[in-house]
Image: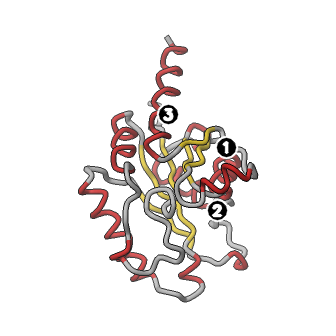
Amino acid sequence: MTPRRFVVLDRDGTIIVERGYLADPDLVQLIPGVGQGLRKLRELGLGLAVITNQSAIGRKYFDQARLEQIHRRLAELLSAERVELDASYVCPHTPDDGCQCRKPLPGLLELASREQNFDPARSFVIGDKPCDIELGQRCGATTFLVRTGYGAEYAVADTVTPDYVVDDVAGAAQVIAGLLSQQEDECR
């Protein structure tokens, strides 16, 4: 049996509105259209996993308990959109900690692929920063830079080379639907 394919998403600026070091669960806000995009990805039979760098924990801006409150709020908002994530993975370290789980290093994506049983090279990685795109490229995934969050700045700066640049998660879902349809046709 072929493992299910997955979409790996960044959190801040991709799924939720970018707020810097988000420490207040009440400030969690879905980016408009993200629910529709995630539902579309689910309809395509894809798994959904979030991988996020949260150095605010390592910087002691807030603790793990606060992060869990933020993620519960995110789950509530997604549930209202009829979407559930398969898993979330968090790097709590600062850039200076030298860990293997901080994007763009592949530690968390490799962990996700083992726990969720998917091939990283057959996955889709969606994010708004170069570290998201580099993570996907290191694993051989198809990469999408969204223009939400910081993505619009990086798209015009031409400092990152994703496979696709799209407006948002819904736009990525449209492209992924087309890619999967094309791959199905090629297999026939």
Callout 3 touching callout 1 (CB < 8 Å): no
**Which numbered tag is attached to residue 176?**
3
The residue at which mark 2 appears reads as 103
Pointer 3: residues within 10 angstroms few (<14), some, or many (20+)? some
Q: CA distance from mark 1 to mark 2?
A: 15 Å
Q: Return the x and y of residue 119 as percentages of the image width and height.
A: 56, 41
Q: Residues within 10 Å of mark 2 (few under 14, many from 20)?
A: many
The chosen color scheme is secondary structure
Local secondary structure at mark 1:
loop
Quadrant of the image containing the N terminus: top left
Of the residues shown, which amino acid type is indicated by label 1? Pro
Measuring from the top left, give residue 112's x and y in whole percent: 52, 55
Question: Which one is closest to the eye, mark 2 or mark 3?
Answer: 3
Q: Nearer the viewer, mark 1 or mark 2?
A: 1
Mark-to-mark CA distance, 2 and 3: 23 Å
Residues at marks 3 and 1, CA–CA distance in whole angstroms: 14 Å
Judging by the rendered image, the residue that carries numbered circle 1 is: 162
Reading the chain from its start, which is encountered first: label 2 or label 3? 2
Q: Earlier in the sequence, mark 1 or mark 2?
A: 2
Q: Give the residue at x 38% y 75%.
A: 68
Does dot 3 land on a helix, a strand or a loop? helix
Which SS class for mark 2? loop
Q: Residues within 10 Å of mark 1 (few under 14, many from 20)?
A: many
Residue at 47 percent across and 76 percent down: it is: 22
Specify which label sits upstream in the sequence, 3 or 1. 1
Question: Which amino acid, mark 3?
Answer: Ile
Q: What amino acid is labelled 2 in the image?
A: Lys
Q: Residue, x 57% and y 37% (percent of image)?
A: 122
| Of the pair 130 and 109, the residue shown nearer to us | 130
In the depicted structure, whether residue 63 falls above or below residue 165: below
